[in-house]
Image (cartoon, rainbow, N blue to C red):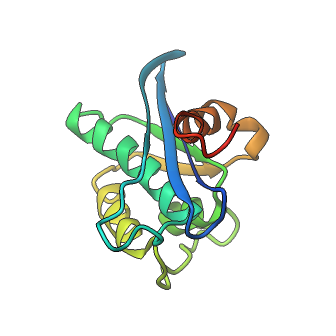
């Protein structure tokens, strides 16, 4: 079983702040991938950032890593503290229905992630509380600390 944790942040204001993301993938209790970075908006769109966009950036790097390493047919559980991302990509655990992607700064990235998720036959997502996502949260905050956005 592969477990992938993701998180995004946008500080000091959301939306419009500096967006950062972090993710890690664990297989057999060993971290096989870890990353963090800042979202780099296009010139002229520097304020088009949000925590939801950052969350989707984190999910996207997870999915791309798994695909590039031919792990997309493995049993995968994606864990994150964004109900929006988990429910849009994998569905509400009660109703099994996926939440709609209704637009917003994150829409393009969300649709790209949905296309990627469809390439994984054995993937599921699970929402977890923020306090259970500290590893990915720390990775996203690390980038914000590097640029002096948060302490």
Q: Is residue 46 left or right of residue 147?
A: left
Which residue sits at x=61%, y=46%?
A: 149
Number of numbered tags placed on the structure image: 0
Q: Is residue 85 left or right of residue 138?
A: left
Q: State the residue lying farthest toward the bottom.
A: 102
Q: Point out residue 48 in the picture as x, y percentages from the top left corner.
A: 45, 72
Which residue sits at x=40%, y=45%?
A: 122
Placement of 26 over or under 6, stated as above or below:
above
Q: State the residue lying farthest toward the front.
A: 148
The quarter of the picture where the C terminus appears is: top right
Placement of 123 over or under 13, stated as above or below:
above
Q: Point out residue 130 in the picture as x, y percentages from the top left corner.
A: 74, 45
Q: Point out residue 135 in the picture as x, y percentages from the top left corner.
A: 63, 30
Near-viewer residue (12 or 1): 12
Near-viewer residue (54 or 70): 54
Residue 25 visible: yes
Residue 72 visible: no
Which residue sits at x=50%, y=56%?
A: 54
Near-viewer residue (144 or 77): 144
State which quadrant residue 41 falls in: bottom left
Which residue sits at x=49%, y=37%?
A: 23
Placement of 149 over or under 151, stated as above or below:
below
Q: Point out residue 5 in the picture as x, y percentages from the top left corner.
A: 55, 38
């Amino acid at each position: 079983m592969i477990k992938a944790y993701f998180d995004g942040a946008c500080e000091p204001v959301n939306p419009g702040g500096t967006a950062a993301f972090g993710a890690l993938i664990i297989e057999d209790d060993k971290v096989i991938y870890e990353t963090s970075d800042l979202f780099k908006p296009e010139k002229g769109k520097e304020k088009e950032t949000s925590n939801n966009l950052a969350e989707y950036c984190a999910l996207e790097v997870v999915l791309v890593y798994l695909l590039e390493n031919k792990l997309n047919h493995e049993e995968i559980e994606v864990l994150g503290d964004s109900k929006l991302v988990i429910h849009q990509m994998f569905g509400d655990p009660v109703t099994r229905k996926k939440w709609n992607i209704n637009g917003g700064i994150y829409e393009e990235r969300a649709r790209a992630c949905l296309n990627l998720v469809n390439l994984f036959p054995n993937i599921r997502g699970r929402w977890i509380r923020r306090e259970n996502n500290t590893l990915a949260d720390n990775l996203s905050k690390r980038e914000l600390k590097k640029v002096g956005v948060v302490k």
